[in-house]
Amino acid sequence: MQRREFLATAGAVGLTTAALGSLRAADVPAKKDYLELRIYTAKDADKKAQLIEAIDKALVPALNRLEIKPVGVFSAHENEKNFQENVFVLFPHKNLDSVATLSAKLLADKTFTKDGAAVFGTTSKDPLYTTYESELYYGFDKCPTIETPVSNKERIFQLRVYRSFNIDKNAKKVHMFDEGGELPLFRKVGMNPVFFGDALFGTKMPNLTYMLGFENEDVRKKAWDAFIKSPEWQEIKTNPMYADTATEIVNIFLKPSDGSQV
């Protein structure tokens, strides 16, 4: 091979390699967060109000000091018949070490324990909450972390849990949203994702869980109507790959606390 031919070939290979590298970089999804959803149970409405105030005042700032943000704090909407005794707290973790060390770091934060006196100053006979469940999810490729799509005071949120009867069907349901086109369609019609997560630990396993945010109830209804009538959805839902993937759906309407960052 002549020198000129060698250089031309080498240059072509270099360009091809660079192009492939660029394509691969474009295909690599953004780094996905681990997402924790805590569901606190309060004894009554008064205790729930005190708990929300303590979370807003103490827990949210403490998590922010650990570079954990945004933190969403929610309670069931007035029209929601169930979950009236619960408080929902949503926040991201960059890695599993953050999950494992969170409690120790919070207890080492003197400002947190001081500001959280309403929780830590009670007794077992009169606590602000009786227990909490903690769910841990891994973000989707097309929604890798918590988003804050709406910020007006009247905003409303919809939390949905899709339980499958085995891990294969759950994986197919995740694919339906992430690769099958449903999640991008949500964005297109104004159904704004807050998070999409594949459950790693928690209840109702296996499942995927997601939350949507809307400016108000009227906007929510119009967005869902547009989604249901869209030809894209008609095509997705009839794909045999996604048949029989969700055997139980839990739907919860939520409102944010005054201190919620979502």
Image: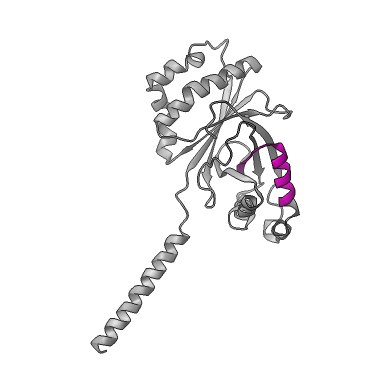
Residue 104 locus on image (x, y percent): 40, 26
Query: Image check: 53 left or right of 11?
Result: right
Residue 81 locus on image (x, y percent): 74, 28
Residue located at (41% from left, 25% from top): 106
Q: Is residue 172 visible?
A: no
Q: Is residue 87 visible?
A: yes
Q: Foreground: 237 or 202? A: 237
Direction front: furthest residue: 152
Whether residue 98 appears in magenta in the rendering, the answer is no
Residue located at (63% from left, 17% from top): 43
Query: Image check: 212 left or right of 28?
Result: right
Quarter containing the C terminus: top right
Q: Foreground: 52 or 102? A: 52
The colouring scheme, among rainbow, by chain, secondary structure or one colour, is one colour
Residue 99 locus on image (x, y percent): 44, 35
Q: Quadrant of residue 84?
A: top right
Residue 199 locus on image (x, y percent): 56, 42
Q: Please report the bounds of the magenta region as a residue range.
A: 209-227
Residue located at (35% from left, 78% from top): 12
Residue 11 lies, with reference to residue 191, above or below; the image says below
Q: Quadrant of residue 63?
A: top left
Quarter containing the N terminus: bottom left
Q: How many marks?
A: 0
Residue 205 lies, with reference to residue 168, above or below; the image says above
Whether residue 226 appears in magenta in the rendering, the answer is yes
Direction bottom: furthest residue: 2
Residue 238 lies, with reference to residue 67, above or below; the image says below
Residue 97 lies, with reference to residue 238, above or below; the image says above
Query: Image check: 40 left or right of 12?
Result: right
